[in-house]
Amino acid sequence: MKNQNINTNQEYKYGFTTDIENIKAPKGLNEDVIKFISNIKKEPKWMLDWRLKAYKRLKSLKEPNWQKPKYPKINYQDLYYYSAPKSMKDKPKSLDEVDPKLIETYNKLGIPLNEQKKLSGVAVDAVFDSVSVATTFKEELTKKGIIFCPISEAIQKHPDLVKKYLGSVIPLTDHYFATLNSAVFTDGSFVYIPPNVRCPMELSTYFRINASETGQFERTLIIADKNSYVSYLEGCTAPMRDENQLHAANVELVALDDAEIKYSTVQNWYPGDKNGKGGIYNFVTKRGACRGKNSKISWTQVETGSAITWKYPSCILQGDNSVGEFYSIAITNNHQKADTGTKMIHLGKNTKSKIISKGISAGQADNTYRGLVDISRKALNSRNYTQCDSLLMGNKCGAHTVPYIKNKNASSTVEHEATTSKINEEQLYYCNQRGLNQEEAVSLIVNGFCKEVLQQLPMEFAVEAQKLVGISLEGSVG
Amino acid sequence: MNFEIKSEEINKFKEISQEEKDFRIKNLKYFNNIGLPSKKLEDWKFTDLREIISNNFKKLDTFQKNEKFSNFKILKDFEHNYIILLNGSLNSFDFSFEDSSKIKIENYTEKNLKYEDNKNSLVNLNHALFTNGYSLEVESNYKFNKVVIIYNFFSENVENQIINKKNKILVKKNSELHLIDYTINKSKFVCNNYEEITLEENSILKNISLQKDRSDGYFHKFSKNKLNKGSKYNQLLFSSGLKFNKLDLEADLLGEDTECNIQAALYLNQNQHQEIKTRINHLAPNSKSYQKIKNVLNSNAKGIYQGKIYVKDIAQKTDAYQLSKALLLNDDTEFNSKPELEIYADDVKCSHGSTSGNVEEDSLYYLMTRGLSRKESLRLLINGFLNDIVDVIKSNTIKDFISSNLEKQIYEYK
């Protein structure tokens, strides 16, 4: 049975395209396009000004080039910055009005947009190319005072919150891709959890790139007010295309006093074919600020897709006693490249951070962990523990570890350890002996290797992620 | 201070060939283009030399003068051969415990005049301006009877100057050489050192570096090491006592079954700044490298370790290890580390660890219950922490000598 399952999944299962009529902004990046996006979203003037400010800044910035995976120069004028299904122009009020083709797409992806799938108990915001198509469970969340909606809606309905927090963690001036996103972001999710509320269900966003020659630039903003809790899931897929597509998202998290945010990602963008043709460039900026005392932000990521993954979900631990966590699995196969890790910036007293990173590299792939732990002079009694392990399969791939560790006071302790090795022959032999074939054995061992991270994922995602780990490594051994 | 060197400086070298002159000019041009390294460069991220030099020197001239000196006291602690260097140039030597036909020592002359752009612009500066140095060769199948101490003596004439010196060591097949690099200096100056070490098949080189006293010296050394099949290289570094010290060590493990060992025990005090940067290139199968760097930091000291292990795809069965441990005694100290792995072969065992923190209160408490004062307990713990590296030394007399040297520094702890 298990064998069958793997075989049917042999290829990238989400590689289909949906034939749907689109509205696009004119090609290229200029002020008019930004105005077009702002206009179509019926944005207030302050938002447009903000975007233009970012664009002005962008013109003076250079693309960074310190990363390990190099890529051909991106022609930013040859991209569409806005693409939306035509039927979304007048936003549907309920799911019944949504184009059935879209619903079908999401059904194919296994995303429970229909309310009948209520049983799964996950509230979903689905983003298709540049717009959010549907948000489920709105009523139930509203009762608790939770705001969960597309960010374009939040800009209109909750401008005070957006104004206060947008760009407060990732400033306009941050770096090239973050600034680009600030100028042209199209949609994304907005979450606000009021004080003393524990969000009763997992919130989830599903991103899908469909149109060709488009970049996807979504923006997510999550605010957990005092003593609240939220768990947020993010998933992504894209059709198989020969071209490389750019995905440059910004995610900002703000946790106030005693609040906790758990952010999980299963990233499965199209990785390109076996020869490294096509695939998504996933250049994402994710950053969380633990503003309040005793706050906590936890990032969990399973990165299996994308031609190039280049992201560092980070925590700024400003509040005293705040906690930052980062759990990551990055799997690269064929010609995929990943340069990922985290930054833990300790500013408050008694702050703690924990980094667990597992990198698996097969085929001709390159996998880099790059991380920063910075304990400032005032962050007394801080603590960090980092563990990054890499697994290599075959001698054409590479695994790299580049940690930066800074400690500026005597009362803090920093620990870092890393190992690199291959799959233990004895373990493989043992599994083979018990009747598992090579691929099943590898999948089992790798799942064991990643266990610490997989355990952090919410139930629904953990199952999917486990399968994904097996599929991503198919054909890499033997 | 803007540190730029005029091309007239090259004209001061009288007895050089046109080819060497061109080589020097090319290197100087490159250096002047880049200038002293600053933290904008990845390799100097934690050490902004440009800032350090301009904060500490009002002027910095290139050193030219030659001088002689008469009475120099050599160590009496144990029997040894010696080489004396005065301000970098070869002064005298004594190999009375050895077969002198097996040893060749002379002034350094540059034979390889191939120009290369360097990541480290100080190497280019060295190529452009080096005035002196030595070259040491050990013939095949010769094992030294006694250790060789290289006395690196700097006179007071070097104050506010920059010395560019070079040295080259070649150990031929099946030979073994033990060195102690012993620096004696009281002046405030910059020493820019370039070192080339080649180990032929199955040869062994063991090297210990240490500094006699605390001094205001600013030292930089680039060390390039080539290890051929079956050779072993062992480098032990002890508290430098220098105001600034950066060792930039690169080792190419070219042959199979090579071994490279780098260990350091550093006690840094009073605004000292020390960086150890290593790059170990595993280029052939079955090679081993081991690095263990221990730092104790006190009052405003800054310690840095940047280590990189590179494993080429054919270098299967590599066993590489990096460990850096730091004790921070004060809140105004700082320790930065960047232990890096770049691995392209799958059947390898590579790992690293890095920790930094304070002395454990429990251990202190234990010692204090035995009647030691807090200060004494601390000293004892620091000593224990660092002495671990001294234990690697096999000869008891040398071990005692190093150990007492280290203790002397730790007892400065107040």
Image (tube, coloured by chain):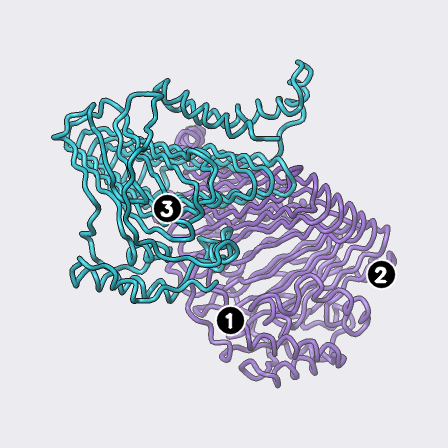
Chain colours: A purple, B cyan
Q: Residue at x 40, y 47 (%)?
A: B220
> Is the Cβ of the residue at disc 1 closer than 8 Å to that at disc 3?
no
Q: Residues within 10 Å of mark 1 (few under 14, many from 20)?
A: few
* Type of amino acid under label 1: Lys
**Camera-nearest label, 2 or 1:** 1
Q: Looking at the picture, do discs 3 and 2 lie on one chain?
A: no
Instruction: Using the image, name the chain to which the residue with label 2 belongs.
Output: A
> Is the Cβ of the residue at disc 3 closer than 8 Å to that at disc 2?
no
Q: Which residue is mark 3?
A: B221
> Which mark is on residue A142?
2
Q: Residues within 10 Å of mark 3 (few under 14, many from 20)?
A: many
* Type of amino acid under label 2: Thr
Whether residue A36 is situated above or below residue B324 in the rendered picture = below
Instruction: Using the image, name the chain to which the residue with label 3 belongs.
Output: B
**Camera-nearest label, 3 or 2:** 3
Q: Measured from the top left, where is residue A321 in percent x and y?
A: 75, 43
Quarter of image, res A422: top left
Q: Looking at the picture, do discs 2 and 1 lie on one chain?
A: yes
Query: Is residue B244 visible in this depiction of the protein?
Result: yes
Give whichever of B324, A273 is nearer the camera: B324
Instruction: Using the image, name the chain to which the residue with label 1 belongs.
Output: A
Q: Measured from the top left, where is residue A172 in percent x and y?
A: 65, 69
Q: Residues within 10 Å of mark 2 (few under 14, many from 20)?
A: few
Query: How far apart in space, not on screen, are marks 2 and 1 (Cα)?
Result: 43 Å
Query: Is residue A437 visible in this depiction of the protein?
Result: no
> Which mark is on residue A62?
1
Whether residue B337 is situated above or below residue B237 in the rendered picture = below
Q: Residue furthest top?
A: B370
